[in-house]
Structures are given as C-alpha cells and as structure tokens.
Image (cartoon, rainbow, N blue to C red):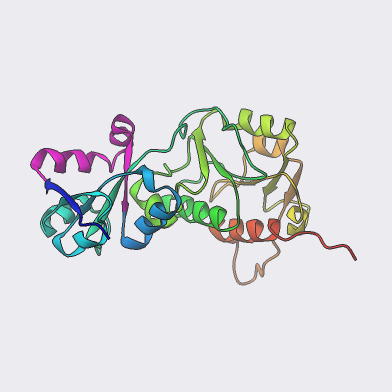
Amino acid sequence: MPLPSRVGPVSLNLLKRYKTLATKKGRLDLGLFLVEGNRAIGQIITSHPDAIVEIIATEEQVSLYGQYPVRIATPKQFQSICLTKTPQGVMAVVRQPAGIYTDRLPDRVGAHVLLLEDIQDPGNVGTLIRTAAAFGYSGVMLSDQCADPLSPKSVQAAAGTVLSVWMRRTGGYLDLVKALKDGGHLVVSADLNGDEEPSIVCGREKLMLALGNEASGPSSALIGISDYRFKIPIRRDRAESLNVAGCGAIGMYLSSIPVRSP
C-alpha cells in the first residue's frame, strides 16, 4: 500500500468549510458531502473510488488510506465536524452524485426503482437506500419533502451505499413516476388501505415500489397513478403498523423473488 499523501493539518478555514457540509446549502455550494467510518468509506472505495476527494483523519487512522490525500485533524477538530456520538476518527469528503436534485431521469433507469414520498426521518431514508442497494434496485426517487439523502444522518444510515444507486430528489417526482409508467414500469404502492397481497410485486420485470409518509402514507395523487396498492398483514392487536423502513424491506425482498412456474 502506498504511503498516505499528507496535505497538511486541518486549518481553521478548512474546518469551517467541512462544517458547512452538515447543511444542505453547504453541500450544494461545494458539491460535496461527508461519509464517516471505515466500513462506509470502504464501500465507497469499492463502488466509486474516484468520488472521494480527500480523507479527514486523526493520526491513528492515517495509514489506512494511502491512495488519497489525507488531512490530519486533532480529536477536538474531528469532534467538531462529526455529528455522531462516538466519532470513528475518519471521514471522506465525497463528490455529490450528478443530477441528484434535478427532475431529469438518468439515461439508464434500470428495472427496479424505489420511490420515497415525503419520508421525513433521515434514518429511514438512509436505511431504505441501503436496502434498495442490497436488493439490486437501480435507483431511488424522492419527493422534495423527503429528508435529504446526503444529510449526515441519512448517509450514516445508508452505510456507504449512497452512491450504489442513482437518486433524484425533486418536487416534480410525480411527473417522473408517470414517465416511468409510460415506459413500462408497474407502479405499486404500499398502503394500509391497499387491497392486494404483498406478493403482487413478485417477479415484476419493471417495477416502481412506492412508499409514503411515515404518518399519512401515500398521497392521493400517488394513489391515483398507482397500478396496485398492497398492504402487509400484521398482528394489529400487538402493533398498529410497521415502520416504513420495515415495510420497504419486505416489499423489496419480495420483488427480488422470481415467480416460479407450477
């Protein structure tokens, strides 16, 4: 492994710059976001090694990232940048994925796409992105009222998979849904009032799986353009409903199962 290219300590100006990446405005202005922890950074290196601009690390972590420029931070400096309770001593400064905040679909949409409508908890957003990547989904579409997928909490929950799928976060998401539907994708929404079994998503060649707001579910507009709505049977005497991340995981798992001929 090559020796790390030390580019110097973290100056006061750099510290201010890194801190702005905790805000959406800062991320948009700089076109960058932060990924913390060896495991998450390792996933980025595996999938998109050229997306990493530099590494911010305490002295103990420097030797692990010889292929990238490394900024040395004191523990106090690192703590001021980090939003987690137990800092891991290493962060990557990563380029923002192209087109994430536009209303233009990528050239290659892929077979399976996840739609998140007004999901406001960043932990849920990050977890669902991670699950989508794990089950082979090509992209994740988000309404503009969703938590920002590049916010620190979302990125932490995504565990390094945030670049493993294409993403679009836009107020024009319903138009994009219609475009995918016109292109042959089946639009299936999870809904407490749905009338289909979850198996409706099994074996679908082109699928958009839609999940609505944690409290209110899919909007009437989304329901109106959905081909099917399914609900997951649960023991309502023990739990009123599933968390949206749990519901999404079940739906995405089922959609990965091919339909077998009898």
* Quadrant position of the C terminus in the picture: bottom right
Residue 236 in magenta?
no
> Residue drawn at (70%, 56%), measured in percent from left and top?
255
Kindly indicate the quadrant of the structure image that contains residue 223.
top right
Residue nearest the observer in this picture, 259 or 211: 259
Q: Position of residue 124 (x, y in %)?
A: 48, 54
- Residue 8, compared with residue 61, is above or below; it is above
Query: Is residue 260 rendered to the left or right of residue 27?
Result: right
Q: Position of residue 87 (x, y in %)?
A: 24, 61
Q: Position of residue 98 (x, y in %)?
A: 44, 33
> Residue drawn at (76%, 50%), measured in percent from left and top?
204
- Residue 163, compared with residue 236, is above or below; it is above
Kindly indicate the quadrant of the structure image that contains residue 123.
bottom left
> Residue drawn at (26%, 49%), measured in percent from left and top?
68
- Residue 209, compared with residue 202, is above or below; it is above
Q: Position of residue 218 (x, y in %)?
A: 62, 43
> Residue drawn at (62%, 38%), measured in percent from left and top?
109
Q: Which residues are magenta?
A: 10-35
What secondary structure predominates along the stretch shown in magenta? helix
Query: Is residue 143 rendered to the left or right of residue 147?
Result: right
Query: Is residue 260 rendered to the left or right of residue 126?
Result: right
* Quadrant position of the N terminus in the picture: bottom left
- Looking at the image, how many numbered discs can be counted on the residues? 0
Query: Is residue 205 rendered to the left or right of residue 165?
Result: right
Residue 21 in magenta?
yes
